Image (cartoon, grey):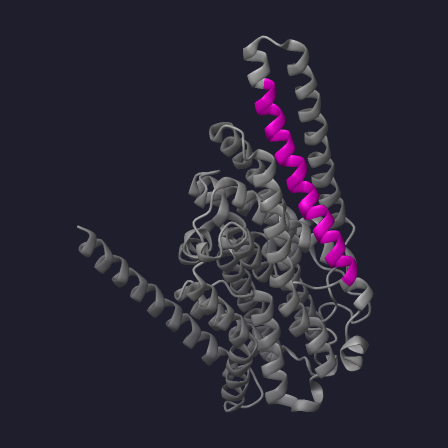
Amino acid sequence: MTVLAAIIDTGALLEVVWVSFAAGVGLTLAFSLAIAAASRATQQRRGGTLGSAIAWWVVTAVCALVCAAAVVTGVTVMLSK
Amino acid sequence: MDADLLLYLVVGVALAFDFTNGFHDTANVVATSISTRALRPRAAILLAALLNFVGAFLSLEVAATIASGIVESSAVSMSVIFAGLVGAIVWNLVTWYFGLPSSSSHALIGGVVGAVLASHGPDAVIGEGLLGKVIVPALIAPVLAFCVAGVAIIVAYRVVGRQRPGPVTRGFRLGQVVSGGLLALAHGTNDAQKTMGVITLALVAHGTLPAEDPEVPLWVVVSAATAIALGTYSGGWRIIRTMGSRIIRMDAAQGFSAQGAGAVVILAATHAGFPLSTTHVISGAVMGSGAAKRLSAVRWGVAGNIAIAWVLTLPMAGATGALVYGFSSLFGGGVAGPVVVAVLLVLGLIGLYLLRLRQDEVAAAEAA
C-alpha cells in the first residue's frame, strides 16, 4: 500500500472520484428534473391551470440552465488543459 | 536521405494510427446515441467526426515525448516510434476485427514500451511510471464510470418514473446529442494530441525542429485532426454494435446516463491531471447503466471478453512492437527494415480488407 501511495497521487484520485460522482449524478438529476418538469408543465397547460404550468416551466428553465452550465464548464476544462 | 525516408515513414504510420484510433474509438462516442435512436447512424458519425476535428484544435499542449515518464526519453528513437506505432495499429485492427473496444492509447504505449524493451532492455522502462500512469488508471476508470453511471440511472428513473414515456424518451435523446458531442470533443483533444506528439518528436529527432521547446507545425495539427476525423467518419461498425447493443439493450435514459457519466469522469480526470482511457470509461459506464437496472441485463460474457482485451492490450501491442523492432533490425540500423515492415503492413491491410469483403458477401448470401 505504501508503495502504491508513493506512485499514485491519491489526492488527485480522490478529487476525480468525488467530482465525478457529484457532477455525474448532479447532471443526470438536473436533466431528469428538466424533462419531468417540462412534462408536468405541458399537462398543466392542457388542463387549463396556467399558473401551475408557468411554475413548472420555470423549474424546467432552471434545470436546463444548470445543464448548460455543466456543458460550458466541460468545454472550459478542455480548453484549459 | 535515409533519415528523410524514415521520417516520412514515421509520419505516414503515425497518421495511419490516428486513422485507426478514429474508427476504433468512434464507438465510444456514437454507439449509445445510435442504439437508442437519438441520432441516425450516419448523422451520429458525421457529428462525431466534425467534433473530433474541432477538438484536435482546441488544445495544443502536446507532450514533448511520447510515453513520457514511462520509458527513458533517451531510448525513444525514430525506429522505436515506428515499431511502437506498428504494434499499436496491429492490435487496434485485431480488436476491431473481433468487435472489442480496447484502448488505442494503451496500444500505443504498449507498442513503444515493447520496442524500447527490444532496443534498450528493461532498464529503459520506468516501472513506477507504467504502474502509476497506465495500469492503476486502467483499473480505476471502468469501476468509477460503472458506479457513477449506475447511481445516475437510478436517480433518473426515480425522477421520471411516473411521467409519460414518449416525452421522457425524446428528452433523453436530445440530451444524448449534447453529451455525445461533449465526448467527441474530449476524444479529439485527447487522442489527436498523441499523434501530434509522435510526429513532433520524429521532427525533433530528424533535426527539423529544435529539441528545446519545439512548436507543433500547423500542417501536423491539420493532418492529425483530418486523420482522426476521417477515421471516425469511416466508422468501426463492429465495435459500435458491441458497445451499442451487445453489452446491454439500453433505453434513452440509460444512454444519457452512460454518456453523461462518461464525459464527467473523463473531464474530472483531465482537470486533475489523472490519465484515464476514454474506451475504459465509456465501456464501464454502459455496463453500470445496465447493471443498475437489472444485473442480468448485462451480457457478462461480452463484458468478460472486453476485459480480456483490455488486459491483453499492453502485452500484445508490446510484443508486436518488440517483434517489429527486432525484425527491422535484421536489415541493419537504416531505413530498409522499416520499409519492409511498412510494405508488409500495407499488404496485411489489403488482405484484411479482402477478407472483410468476403465475409460481407457470405453474410449477404446467407441473409438472402
Residue for point 20% across, 52% down: B367
Left or right: where A8 falls relative to A36: right
Residue for point 25% across, 63% down: B358
- The quarter of the picture where residue B104 lies is bottom right
Left or right: where B124 falls relative to B34: right
Main secondary-structure element of the magenta-colored stretch? helix
Residue B201, position as x, y percentages in the image: 69, 70
Residue A44, position as x, y percentages in the image: 59, 15
Q: Nearer the viewer, residue B313 or B302?
A: B302
Q: Is residue B98 visible?
A: yes
Decide: is B326 above or below A44: below
Would residue A18 be counted in the magenta stretch?
Answer: yes
Would residue A50 be counted in the magenta stretch?
Answer: no
Residue for point 53% across, 41% down: B253
**Magenta stretch bounds:** A14-41
Q: Nearer the viewer, residue B18 or B289?
A: B289
Q: Is residue B262 visible?
A: no
